[in-house]
Amino acid sequence: MKSIIPREVETLWTLFTAPTVWALHFIACYVTVAVFCAKRLPSSFTFDGVRIALVIVTVLALAMIVLSGYLAWRQWGFGAADPPHDEPTRDARTLFQGFATLLLSGLSFVAVVFASIPLIFIAECQP
C-alpha cells in the first residue's frame, strides 16, 4: 500500500512533534480555563462552551499525535526490526529514531488524555 505521506517528512523533527503537541494542548487547556474563570465573561458564554472548545482541541491534538505515531511506526519499519538498534549505521539510527518517536507518541497520547480528564469533572468556576 502506497502512503500519501512522503518519506521526507520523517526527520529528526518528528521526534519532537508529539511532545510539542502535548505541551501546546496542556497550555491551551489550562490557560483557557484560567482566563475564563478569572474574567467571568457574560452569561451568554458558559463553561460548557469552553468545555466543547477544549474537547475539539483535544481531539485535534490526539489526531496529530496519532499521525506522528504512524509516521514513527513507518520509520521504524512497521516493527519488523527488534530493538536495540545500536549499530553505528544510518539504518540503525533511523530505526532507533522511529522507535523512540513511537514511544514518545504513546506517552504524549496518554498525557493529553490525562490533561483532558479535568474537563469531565470540573462543573464550573468557583468564586
Image (cartoon, rainbow, N blue to C red):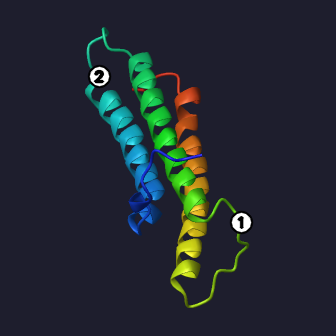
- Residue ranking furthest to the top: 44
Q: Residue 50 falls in which quadrant of the image? A: top left
Q: Is residue 93 left or right of residue 42?
A: right
Q: Which residue is mark 1?
A: 80
Label 2: state its secondary structure. loop
- Residue ranking furthest to the bottom: 88
Residue 106 placement (x, y as % from top left)? 61, 54
Label 1: state its secondary structure. loop
Residue 41 placement (x, y as % from top left)? 26, 19
Q: Of callouts 2 and 1, which one flags the residue occurring earlier in the amino acid sequence?
A: 2
Camera-side residue of 124 and 46: 46
Camera-side residue of 58 and 41: 58
Q: Amino acid at mark 2?
A: Arg
Assign the C terminus to one quadrant of the image.
top left
Residue 74 placement (x, y as % from top left)? 58, 58
Which residue: 44% across, 59% down?
7
Q: Is residue 69 left or right of residue 13?
A: right
Which residue: 44% across, 28% down?
56
Q: Does 42 sit above or below residue 91?
A: above
Residue 5 placement (x, y as % from top left)? 44, 49
Q: Amino acid at mark 1?
A: Ala
Q: Does 4 sit above or below residue 107?
A: above
Which residue: 63% across, 86% down?
86
Question: Residue 114 bears which disc, if any?
Answer: none
For disc 2, the neighbor class at 10 Å (few under 14, some 14 to 19, many from 20) is few
Which residue: 44% across, 21% down?
52
Question: Residue 40 bears which disc, if any?
Answer: 2
